[in-house]
Amino acid sequence: MNGLAQFTALNRLSLDLTTGLQAVYSAVPEILKHLKIRFLLTTALAVVLDYQLVDAATSDSLFRVDRINALVTVVLFSIAILLYTKWAKQGKSLFVRKIAGLDAVEEAVGRATEMGRPVLFIPGIQEIDEIETIAGISILGRVAKITAQYDTPLVVPVRYPMVLAAGQEVVEQAYVEMGRRDSYNKDIVRFVAGEQFAFAATVNGMMMRDRPAANIYMGAFFAESLLLAETGNAAGSIQIAGTARPEQLPFFIAACDYTLMGEELYAASAYLSREPIMLGGLKGQDLMKVIIVALIIIGVILMTLGSGELYRSLFEAV
Amino acid sequence: MRTIVPVIIAFLSGFVMVISFFFNPDRAFIGRIESEVLVWVTIVGGFTLLLGVVSITRVNWHAVQSKKEGWVYNLLTLLSIFVMAIPAILPSSWSPLLGRATGSIYDWLFFHVDYTMMATMFAMLAFYIASAAYRAFRARNPEATLLLITATLVMLWRIPMGEAFLRLFSDNLPWLFSDNLPDKINTYIMSGANVAVQRGILIGAALGAASMSLRIMLGIERTYMGKG
Amino acid sequence: MNFWEKVGALDRRWIYLLVALSVIFPLIVPMSFKISITPEAQQLYEAVDSLPDSSVVMLTFDYYPSTVAETEPMAIAALHHLFRKNCKAITLSTVPLGGPSMAERVTRTLAKEYHKVYGIDFVNLGYKANYVAVLKGMGTSIESIYPTDNSGTPLSKLALMKKVKNYNDISFIFVVADNDIVTYWISIVNAQYGTPVGAGVTAVSAPKYYAFISSGQMTGLLGGMKGAAEYELLVRAQGMAEKGMGMQSVVHLMIILMVIMGNIAFFAARWAQKGRSE
């Protein structure tokens, strides 16, 4: 295919892409309809396809042109997040569907208050550098505000010293913001054990002795997930779990009352705080998902018709 | 300052690593930053392990000193750390019992204590999964029924006895099952429905993680610093 | 509470007892069954089997001692295969808790059987912190990440490592893992450096990796003890996994029967309740 024919084919492809996006998601920003953006997209596609054949290891170029598809994704993703965050700041109302597990958090804390029993919160068993642990700590902050408000005892066993430090800061801040500085106790967040099953054994012991009314597991879990959840069930606690590890989800679903799956864990912080800026980020992420779904549908149709190789080469792994 | 400096560090580190990914390391210094930083991270990672040991020692020693409830177990933890670590750190040239080679104290303690205890704890999952399955796999509604049937088929498929049992159906009812039933389970459940669901969760989780990372880089998400 | 309601609310300790008996019974009455090979295990076996003799394979011991029942038989079977084919094995671990020790024990035991020499036929690199940095760093230079092997010998003094500088000199990566490290091996090593990756994982994690098999990013998969038994059968080296299939079979059947009983109890109790309310 010569250069002009290739360019024309790409231009048609980019038109199909933008039209498809508009058909699927009517709130696609107006800018995507603009001719200039279509031209940029076509050019980017042309560059990607032209340079796909170049061996990056021997290429003399300054820029890793074989990774341009990743760059386009990163830029698109960032634009989506920033755009929705901007709209949220401007006061645009953003709909977020109900997440039953997160709505149940306040209910669970209320139950614990009525029964006079503590709430047990575990922010995962990974280190602070794991994104799931950060998500868990961020949810801990929200839960700590609720327990501070109702004056419900909160117990947070952690596995690593850095998570201990972050957890203590977050909980203390939550109690201070709710005006319950006097109720805060450094031992709310306690360092329990450094090893996975030692941690599970210690927490199981705490559950059977203290009988918390509510157990909230939010973060990264491994094999101990079932040990914790089953013991919590035996202790009669209401259990809410959230993890992005697909292999642990079945255990939580079988043993817990509510389970947050995958990205619902990352959305939890935004959902519980209802801060416009956080919700904006969530919506931006959803736009990206819509784009991916549209791209998958287009790819399936093209591959079924037997003309999807060109399209597939756009998504070659980096 | 306490808030601004960490946010600036988070932004700069994230931004530099992202940018570095798109430049040729042979042509630009910025392309080499990624691999340089990763080597630094490996070195720092070694120190964080040491930091972990120091923190565990400090926390447990404090519990022993103040005779907190269960302080004996804290003392046991401290003894375990030092009995295992000190012989492992000392040079094996002093004695074959030192170091981490086969026959050393570390090696013996690892294989006869740690190895067996960890395997035992993991083995307990078999009991827990049985009781969780008994309680959770009830045909309360259509979704639960689907879960129950799929789980039963997969459990049968994973054992030789079960495979032989499933094959009985395809061998004796060829008009109903055109192919080997265990292979059908592999194709339609494991490589079909399972793959679709796993991909969906993986894509969603990856987007969620990327969004969270972007929020941290831009300073929108600061709860990990204690600032709600 | 009528009989079926009692059955439905059975004390979990009876279930624990049944599981214990199901595990003990095959130990007293040994059972052996015909094991069929899944296409994923066959694919992994063929990928390793098609390697030219003297190829260099990286075998990782990325599992904790807790999962040895499922993962160690895979590592052992893999080493049987590699040593039999005269492939060179570079072992390493991204797990600090005993990974290098387990690698040491398994490789030394099998090396004696096949008369393999350390430093020429196999090397144990040991453990280094931060697996992302390790995996990426080895793409440029293995020596930059592991200046010495697990026993402290500089890599420059090992004959095998003089020929192997980075992933370009490695023909295949056989990951034996019980955690998410497989995803990093695929996304960092296979995606960016093109080295084929095959994995043996625990049964719990195996469903996740079917997506990578289907997209061609992973070459073969062993799932759990069954996967280990399949590989042992393929390399004709009977080990713990094949023997363990008897126990696994009885326990699975017991759980299935318990689930059926639980459902019968559930419906019977429901009908009884309906009858009472009418």
Image (cartoon, rainbow, N blue to C red):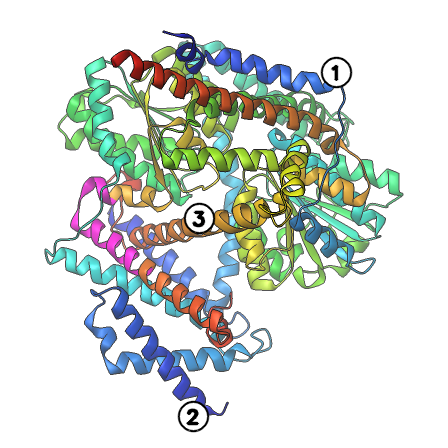
Q: Is residue A33 magenta?
A: no
Residue C162 x %, y % = 77, 58
Q: Chain of mark 1?
A: C
Are there few (<14), some (14-19), or many (20+) residues within 10 Å of tag 2? few
Q: Name the residue located 75 percent from the left edge and 18 percent from the top edge.
A: C29
Helix, strand, or loop for circle 2? helix
Question: Which amino acid, by three-letter code, is at mark 1?
Answer: Ile
What residue is shown with label 1? C28
Q: Label 1 crowding class (10 Å Cα cut-off): few <14, some 14-19, many 20+?
A: few
Label 3 is placed on what type of residue? Answer: Val
In which quarter of the view is residue B112 placed?
Answer: top right
Residue range corresponding to the magenta coloring? A270-288
Query: In which chain is the residue bearing label 2?
Result: A
Q: Is residue A195 visible?
A: no
- Nearer to us of marks 1 and 2 is 1
Circles 3 and 2 on the same chain: no
Residue under circle 2? A4
Q: Farthest residue toward the left?
A: A91
Question: Hey, which residue is sitting farthest right in the picture?
Answer: C115
- Which element type, helix, strand or loop, lies under badge 3? helix
